[in-house]
Structure formats: C-alpha cells, structure tokens
Amino acid sequence: MSTERPITPPRKQFSHQSSSSKKGPFDARHKLERVQHYAYQKDTHQKTDFENADNLFEFLGAPTFDDLAEVDFSATVSRSDFLRKANSMSKSIKEEYFKEPSNRLVVFKDTESKVPRGHVADAECRPNITAAFENDFGGDDTTFWPCIRMAGGWASEGSTSEDQEMQAISYLHYLLLARPDLYIAQGMLGSEDSMMFQVGIGGFGVRRLKIGWNDKKLSKLLYAFIYRTYDPGHFADSAYKLDPIVGEDNPPTWTITIEVTSQVGGVTTERPVPCPNLLPLYASSPFETRTHVFATKGEGVDVDGKKLTVLKDQVCRNRNRLDEHEILKLVHEPKRVPGVVEAVYHKTIELSSQLGGLSVGRVKHRHGLRQLGRPFATIPTVKEMLQVAFDLVEVLRFLRAKRNILHRDISIGNVMYAPPSEVKEDPDTSTQDSE
C-alpha cells in the first residue's frame, strides 16, 4: 500500500490519452493511469503581482547587463519583432556568459499547433512560444516537455483577458509537472499592447508583471528571463539531471542524486548516491502538494543494503501532522509488516531560499521506497482479486490492532499485488510477523 492521497481529476480542459510503457514484473504502475488534468482554480493558481520591473529583476537574480555592450537596452521591443529580438539577445548572452563549447544556444520558436512530446501526463496543450536548447528541437520544431526552458503564448483574438491568462498559466502548470527539477517555471503572455512575464512557483502559485511594448524596461526584463533559461540557479534542484534522450519513442528519464547519511566510527557522514534512469510515473498538483513519483528501470539502487525502487518528491506544509516517513517507520517497527511499502530513504528540503525568500510555509520531502507490485486493476481473475482484497483487510486489521494506525485512504491507486508466480523475486513479501 502507498500512503499517498489520490487526486480526483477536475474537469478536462485539454485532451489526454493514456500511454503504456514496458517495465519489469514489479513496478509502481499503479500511478501511471492517474492523469493530472488542468482546470483553473482561483485558490490553487493564486496570482500575485510584482511591485514593479525592478522587483521582478531582483527576483530573477540575473547579473547586471553592463557587459552586453552590443545590446541596446534603451530600445523598445515590438510584438512583431519579439522572437527575433529574443533570439538575438539569447545569442549575446551565450557569447558573453556561457562561452564554453559544451554550453548550447537557447532558441525561442513559434510552436503554435505543435504538441511537445514526452509529458508524464500525456498533455496535449500547445504553447505558442517555446524556448529550448537549439539541438533539443526536432525537424518539426517540437521538443520533449522536460527539455523546455520556458513556455508561453500569444493572447487569442476574441478571448477575454482572464481566459488568455488562464491559458498561459496552464503552460506553467504542465511545465512544472514535466520538470520535477524546477522550483520555479518561467512563462510569458504576449498581447497587442503588452508582455506579461510569469513565474510559476511550485507549491505556491503564480507571480506576474505586465509591461507595455513601448516600455524601455522590457528589454532588461527579457534579458534576465533569458539568462535564467541558461542558468536556472536557485530556480532548480541540483540533485536532478535529465538523462540523454535516445529516440522519439523512448520516455525521458532522470538521474536523481540522493545524500545518504551513515554512521562510521561514531562520525556522521553523507555520501552522494546517484539513482539513474528514473522513469516519471506520476505528477500532480504543482501549486499545492506538488508530487512526483519515479520508478527505477532495473533492480533498484542499493541504500545501506536495501533496494530503492521508487523515489517520491512531495511538497507538504511545515509541521504537517501526517508525515509519511514517520508513519512508515511506525508500521515497520519492531518488525517489517508484509504487504506495506517500506521506506529506505528520507530527506527534508527547505524551500524558502529556492523560492526567492518567499515564506510559503512548505517543505519538500524526498522519499525512497521499496515499492514492489503490479496495479490492482491488472489482477486477471475474480478469485485472485478476492484473495488480494482479503489480504488487504488483514493488513488493515493488523495496522489498527497492532500499530494503532488507521489507513483512511484506500483506493485502487494505493493497492498493488504480487502474483504468486513472482513472489519468489521478493522474499520479504512472504515474511510472516509473529505478531
């Protein structure tokens, strides 16, 4: 069982399709079919304005632009010339600040009607403006969602200003789902008379600033926005690294490096342990309890003698009375309880410094789980399904009677099963507790 709270998708605003992927006999596919749909909600996608252009520039934290002598920051930017101006400025930024041959050029493209590939939720929304490294675009000017550095759009004719902004926020919503490494996603919304710069802050909401095309500060903000597409800095979690994408049909994977604490001779030490080829299975609620679930493609990563097969990042409120890691520790002490997922790693990450000093009252929990099984919905026969249901009731009874824990979140998304023919691959699933 998993202790994650299931999310009932709100009404659809875009079309989605489920996708299948081949994995080993034990995996966490119970999350794969639960797609997170976008629907604008005022309380969830809360919007706040930056006070002025200087306030946004300070938030972005880019270096001063004095070194870019060839860029005329006093010139205005027009809507019709925006992409050319953005790409010219991007080239100047690369030549000045990112000169090494290994650094690539960020390009802005008009990608209207083109659907980016490889989204964990199979999103089919189409950003009008997409920024990514030049060689991450294919021949049809599409790219993978995890490669997108900034997603924006142009205001649609005939739409209200509120509808236009909702559309732009949807790009930030899906970008945060596709980019688990980002604490802050960048977006923009262009209209006939202005450009709105937007930042989607995971676990918090959207901050924005609208500035007219004829405002001379627009060039400076565009510079700072483009600079952050090259170097996310504190906008991103440095533990994440996108693996090289091989072929258009292979889903993108990530390497996430965890810091494992050990006691050696009475001295506490930390060592980095890379978790390679983690496949995103599930992502939800980017502006609330932001959750990302990954599964290893192989046998798992060794963490102090235990195999980590699932990694889960989740943003929670400070001092939340329901701490998943603590609950799982209580479940498996003094002895491991068969039938309940086992925690093998945990770290709490403070978010205030990553979110530009905002007091969001939230922290990120990184859980490493030993989560083996198949989706409940794939049980082949009614007889086996009833057997699993009986085992489930027994586990729940045991937790209530022996651990004083009541699981209040039972759903097919939180139940997995181990087919009898495959139990031998995980000896612990047959362990019996004398209790």
Image (cartoon, rainbow, N blue to C red):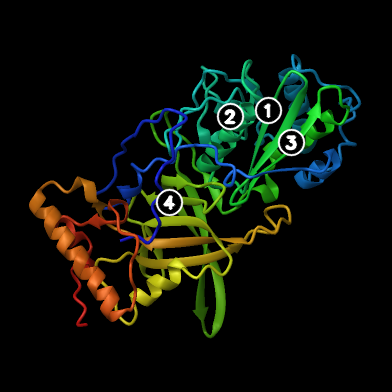
Do the residues bearing badges 1 and 2 touch, measured as CB atoms within 8 Å?
A: yes
Measured as percent of width and height from the top left, residue 272 is found at: 53, 62
Do the residues bearing badges 3 and 1 touch, measured as CB atoms within 8 Å?
A: no
Measured as percent of width and height from the top left, residue 324 is found at: 43, 66
Identified at 53% across, 67% down, the residue is 320
What kind of element bears circle 3?
helix
Q: Residues within 10 Å of mark 3 (few under 14, many from 20)?
A: many
Do the residues bearing badges 1 and 4 touch, measured as CB atoms within 8 Å?
A: no
User: Which residue has dot 3 on it?
Assistant: 225
User: Which residue has dot 1 on it?
Assistant: 189
What kind of element bears circle 4?
strand
Q: Earlier in the sequence, mark 4 or mark 2?
A: 2
Disc 3 to disc 1, C-alpha distance: 13 Å
User: Which residue has dot 2 on it?
Assistant: 167
Q: Nearer the viewer, residue 396 or 267?
A: 396
The amino acid on which the numbered mark 4 sits, given as a three-letter code, is Val
- Residue lying at the far left of the rendered structure: 383
User: Which residue has dot 4 on it?
Assistant: 293
Would you say residue 28 is visible in this rendering? yes
Q: Earlier in the sequence, mark 2 or mark 3?
A: 2
Quadrant in the picture for the N terminus: bottom left
Quadrant in the picture for the C terminus: bottom left
Nearer the camera: disc 4 or disc 2 = 2
Disc 2 to disc 3, C-alpha distance: 20 Å
The amino acid on which the numbered mark 2 sits, given as a three-letter code, is Gln
Do the residues bearing badges 4 and 3 touch, measured as CB atoms within 8 Å?
A: no
Left or right: where 333 falls relative to 184: left
